[in-house]
Image: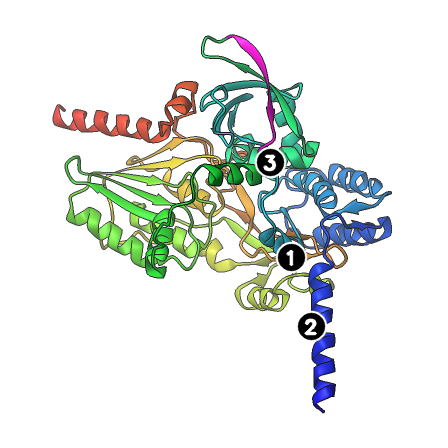
Amino acid sequence: MRRTLLFCCTILLTACGVSKSSFSPAHKFAPDQLQKDYDLYRAILEHHHPSLYWYTSKDSIDYYFDVGRRQLSDSMTEPQFRKLLSFVTAKINCGHTTVRSSKAWSKYSDTVRVGKMFPLSMKLWNDTMLVTANLNRKDSILRRGTMITKLNGKTVAELTDTMFQYLSADGYNRTHKYQSLSNRGYFGSLYTTIYGPKEKYELEYLDTTGTAKTITIPVYNPAADTVGRMAVRPPARIPQPSKKERRRQQISTIRLLRIDTVNHSAMMTLSTFGKGYGLRKFFRQSFEALEKNGITHFIVDVRGNGGGNVNNSTLLTRYLANQPFRTADSLYAIHKRSSYYRHIQNHFWNKLFISFFTKRKKDGKFHFGYFERHYFKPKSRHHFDGKTYIVTGGNSFSATTLVTSALIRQENVIVVGEETGGGAYGNSAWLIPDVTLPVTGVRFRLPLFRLVIDKNIPKDGHGVQPEILSLPSMDAIRRNADYKIETVMELIKADQAKNKNP
């Protein structure tokens, strides 16, 4: 019996070892395997996506589906297949429909050392590209604020036109795509995905006198950099914070309220409306503090807020709104059952949700009537009636757009910054399960509901436009200045001065 048990354990451990070590990032899938996953990908999108043809006509979507299918005549690695899917998916023009790596690839990425990478982080807007960080710290030329005009022979316009083809966004929103490329490290990651890894990069740039120059820089190798630093000085022992302190630090990056009692102003920074961050309690305590300290000017910074739970975004709106408001003019799913249920995450619970909370109407859609009909009333306790400044940008997405849309018409609310990443007319979201393709394991996000925020505004494929535009500048980037907050502070000072001298 003991021998039998030992034999079984040996077989089990061996099998686990083979399974763990059998994953190879260089593994290629045969054309017929890729075609099987691709056909399923297309079929599920055509059956379930509520806004597949919202911003791109069916003829055009079919064309891109066919273009992608024709490219599957040769073997591909998972990253190559993901690149193809990202190109096709971006044509849907839905910011919530994106491609993700397989779980096996994610697990592999978590266990391997970071490899060579493009050394620069960039800030991009309106075909302008400036360096914001350089991993090669000994480089004294390409410092923060240096303008790059070409990379490996391609102009900034050529680079962005190509890279935008792989980025999903609501409608025709370019602000969100520029911001995505400006997020730390993302430009280099996408550049490598599209153009392949390089050992060297040739850049054309403008020096401090505005003279055009050329420089060739090496790829950043973190292994070599680490070895070099260790040879000079051993790493110092840094006391690790407690679990409670780490949690507190994490929370402070998600939600934070700062009060300036001297100037009677406050700023709330919100990076998400997601669950698990105690936002209900945070909002209650924050608005109580505003009232207690006699705050007259309030900044709500949602530039990095990608959305989350609509109950949390609605609650924040209730503390600021001066009249009842609705979340949606229409909100519906097109199906509640699926013959593809094996591949759709949480399909049973999603079906149950749609069955309990929606009703099928004459148009055949499953409408979430509560949000279509219900008007939310402003909070009576600790309601803020002073001047509010909502700071937005290309990363302001999803539920953040709901808040901005509901408040922008108020006289005491001013939206400052850039166009929101989330669509002003609406988006596709609410329930967003992952779909896992069975052969490659590649996943993509599938929004199940279409949300129309305001049917009376143009469906032009853009986000909520700020009332006061605050764009980046070379000077602001070089100074590492928070130019949007600088704009808001100037508005606050002007308003306070006007109130003192009416």
Residue 75 colored in magenta in the image = no
**Residue 103, numbered label:** 1
Q: Position of residue 444 (x, y in %)?
A: 65, 51
The local secondary structure at tag 3 comes to loop
The local secondary structure at tag 2 comes to helix
Q: Which badge, 2 or 1, is on the more N-terminal residue?
A: 2
From the image, state whether disc 3 or disc 1 is nearer to you. 3
Q: Position of residue 492 (x, y in %)?
A: 24, 30
Q: Position of residue 89 (x, y in %)?
A: 68, 43
- Residue situated in front as seen by the camera: 138 or 343: 138
The boundaries of the magenta stretch are: 211-221
The secondary structure making up most of the magenta span is: strand
Q: Which residue is mark 3?
A: 117
**Point 69% across, 68% down: residue:** 16
**Point 30% across, 53% down: residue:** 283
Q: Amino acid at mark 3?
A: Met
* Image-quadrant location for residue 359: bottom right
